[in-house]
Amino acid sequence: MKCKITNKPIQPFINFGKMPIANGFIEEKNFSKEFFFNMEVGFNDDLSLVQLNDHPKPEKMFNENYPFFTGSSEYMKTHFKKYANFVKKYIKSNSKIIEIGSNDGTFLKNFNGQSNKVLGFEPSKNVADVSIKNGIPTLNSFFNKKNVANLKEYLGQTDLICASNVICHVPDLNNLIEAVDLLLSASGTFIFEEPYLGSMFQKVSYDQIYDEHIFMFSASSVSKIFQRFDLKLIDAIPQDTHGGSMRYIIKRNNNEINQNIKKIINFEEKEKINSLESCLKFKRDCELSKEKILKKIKLLKNTGKTICGYAATSKSTTVLNYCNIGSKEIDFICDTTKEKIGKFSPGMHIPIKDMDYFHRNITDCIYLFAWNHKNEILNKEKKFKGEWFSHVEL
Ligand code: DWN
């Protein structure tokens, strides 16, 4: 599918090659049927937006077998508790709150026991079921104009709409923003957090790009996109989650913007973050990163070292397929998610094992794929005395 934010063709600047579904952990019997797409990334000059040129249909990624649960990280649970406290200044005691892509309810759970009326939208059925089990009212559907149209008591009456690591997953951003506009009350607020383009460039964390992550936002692109809908970016607050994210706060156009926005947009201009020039530098950095990690792995293998991967992240699918790293190099990847264990990594088919297996089969070195959860993981695995490494600086 082609991305929809603009009809103008976007300028491709890097091609990561043939990519499988990032969360498409696969059984051996299905190897021959595996789906791949061409992962090419472009720069939309009008909107200062980095985006995939092409992507699989959302239903191919978000369905009854989606294997990511926000609650798999203790750090993220704490983050969402703090996030829930932060948004309280934007609501009243009886405000209606909607979360787009509410996953297992980790965020909305924080409003349990309060008089707010909360509602989650979660398109992946198995994940929505967990949220419902957690006591969170959840609609198992995509968030779009059609699906909000029947929510009569929410239309124009929702004081807060939140989302985390979701807006960049939605190909039809126009439709999503129109749905937000339909729901938001006159003084309502839309708050969302996403991986930040500036952090991705700085860390060369190109693994933030995969089928689900269609857009890589900056404050400049978010501001330009929402302006088209008479909505205003009034504040942006950097977050340390997922290797560097940004929390964006959107209100109706009659609101004042915070000085923070000017600072961040000035910073982006000074650093030329929203330019083809930076995209081309990023491309070269990705190529160097690939060379460096392959050299590192070759050296380890040549000296007889064994390597396992830690955490079968979505991000790891990009790294493994782009760098062509498979089970010759990495014996297995360990992970806590039961939906991934016993299967194989998308595309490169490295076996996924549980944590027990990991502790019984300690390798000499560990490739940390969840580098964004480094503190939490290293803290848990203090007994491991070998080498941790990754393609981003640890
Ligand atoms: O946007 C997205 C982000 C927020 O989450 C999604 N599109 C999907 C997902 O991306 P990811 O898979 O790269 O997320 P994480 O949070 O970096 O990694 C999660 C994976 O790591 C899970 O499979 C669980 C695993 N994990 C583990 O095995 N042990 C995670 C932690 C913290 C651990 O201690």
Image: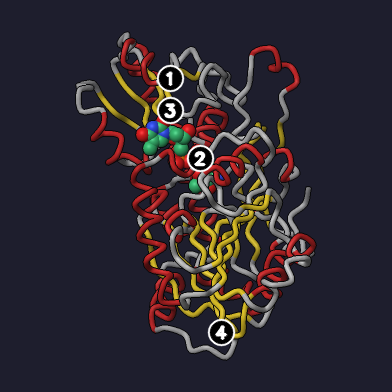
Q: Which mark is residue 354?
A: 1
Q: Is mark 2 within 8 Å of ligand 1?
A: yes
Amino acid type, residue under disc 1 in the picture: Asp
Residue 146 found in image quarter:
bottom right
Cα distance between the residues tagged 1 and 4: 48 Å
**x, y percent for residue 339:** 55, 27
In the picture, residue 231 is in which quadrant?
A: bottom right
Q: How far, Cα to Cα, is label 3 from label 4?
A: 42 Å
Mark 1 near mark 2, Cβ–Cβ under 8 Å?
no
Instruction: Assign a secondary structure to mark 3.
Output: loop
Q: How many other residues sit within 10 Å of disc 2, few (<14), some (14-19) or many (≥20)?
A: some
Per the image, the residue denoted by label 3 is 336
The answer to which of 267 and 187 lies nearer the viewer is 187
Label 1 vs 4, first from the N-terminus:
4
Residue identified by numbered label 4: 187
Element class at badge 1: loop
Ligand 1 within 8 Å of disc 4? The answer is no
* Residue 369 visible, this orientation: no
Residue 375 screen position, x and y as percent: 27, 41
Q: Earlier in the sequence, mark 3 or mark 2?
A: 2
- The local crowd at label 3, few if under 14, some if 14 to 19, many if 20 or more residues have their Cα within 10 Å, is some
| Amino acid type at image mark 3 | Thr
Q: CA distance from mark 1 to mark 3?
A: 6 Å
Q: Is mark 3 within 8 Å of ligand 1?
A: yes
Q: Amino acid at mark 4?
A: Ser
What residue sits right under mark 2 in the picture?
A: 69
Residue 154 seen in the figure? yes
